Image (tube, helix red, strand yellow):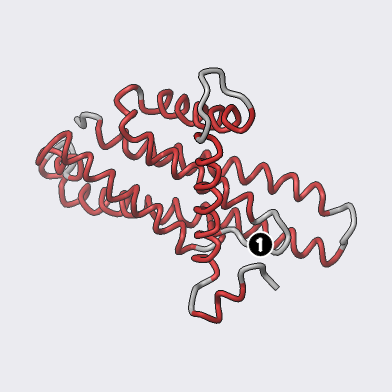
Amino acid sequence: MHSLSFLGHVGVPSQVAYMWLVMAILAVCSFLATRRLQMAPSGFQNFMEVIVEAFHNLLIDTMGPEGKRFFPLIATLGLFILTSNLLGLIPGFESPTANLNTNAAMALVVFVLTHIVGVQVHGVKYIKQFLGPIWWLTPLMLPIEIVSHLSRPISLSVRLFGNIEGGHIVLAVLFLLVPLLVPLPILVLKLLISFIQTLVFMLLSMMYIAGAMEEHH
C-alpha cells in the first residue's frame, strides 16, 4: 500500500498528493538552506548552493546571459523533476513524474512561455517563422511548423513519463522475480535515469525558449 494512498479516499489523486509532498520537501529544503545564510557556506546551505549553481551554469551555457531572467522557472523545474524522480526510488512512494498529467502541466507552461517570449521579442514578425522563407511555400510550411511546435509539449511529457514509469515497472518486475541482488544494477540505472531525464527536460525547455528569442530568417 502506498504511503499516501489514504488521500485517494478523500478524492485527491495520488500524483497530486505526491506532488504536494515534493513541494513540501523543497519548501523545507529552502528553509533549511536559507535560515542561517553565511558568506562561507557550509552544511546544507553549501549542498543547495552547489545544485543551484550547477543549474545556473547550465542555463548560461545554453541560453547565454540573456537567459538569466528564466532561471527561476528552469531551476524550479529542475528541482521539482529531480526530487520527484528520486522519490519514486523509495519503497512505498510514487514519482509524480510517472504520471502523464504532471508532466503535461510542466510542458504546457514551457510551451506557452516560449511563444509569449517570441512575441515579446519579435512582435508580430514572430509569426513569420511559421510561414516559411518564400510566400508560395506558406501552404506547405505552415502546417509543418504548427505540428512541429505542438509536438514539443507532447514530446516533453511522454519522454519523461515513459522513462520514469518504465523504470518503475522494470524494477518492480525484477523485485518480484529475483528479489535479492539482481535488481540492484537496475536500481543504479534508475538513479542515473532520474538525473538524465531531469537534464533533458531542462535542456529542451531552455532550447525552445532560446529559439523563440533568436532572429529567424
Q: Where is residue 54 drawn, in percent x and y?
A: 52, 28
Which quarter of the figure is the N terminus placed in? bottom right
Percent position of residue 189, x then y: 72, 45
Work out which residue is located at the far front of the displayed protein and give it: 36
Please, what is the three-letter code of the amino acid marked with disc 1?
Phe
129 to 144, vertically: above or below: above
Q: Is residue 198 above or below residue 12?
A: above
- Could you say which is closer to the camera, residue 170 or residue 29? 29
Does dot 1 land on a helix, a strand or a loop? Answer: loop
The quarter of the picture where the C terminus appears is: top left
Report the residue that reaches farthest toward the bottom: 9
Category of crowding for the residue at label 1, using alpha-carbon neighbours closer than 10 angstroms: few (below 14), some (14–19), many (at least 20): some
Indicate left or right for 5 with 110 as reference.
Answer: right
**Which residue is pictured at 85% across the width and 66% down the height?**
177
Q: 131 or 25: which is nearer to us?
A: 25
Total numbered badges shown on the rendered structure: 1
Q: Residue at x 75, y 44 (%)?
A: 188
Give the residue at mark 1.
Answer: 93
Please state if 69 lies on the left or on the right of 24 as rendered. Answer: left
Q: Is residue 40 above or below residue 18?
A: above
The reply, left or right, for residue 100 in relation to residue 94 is left
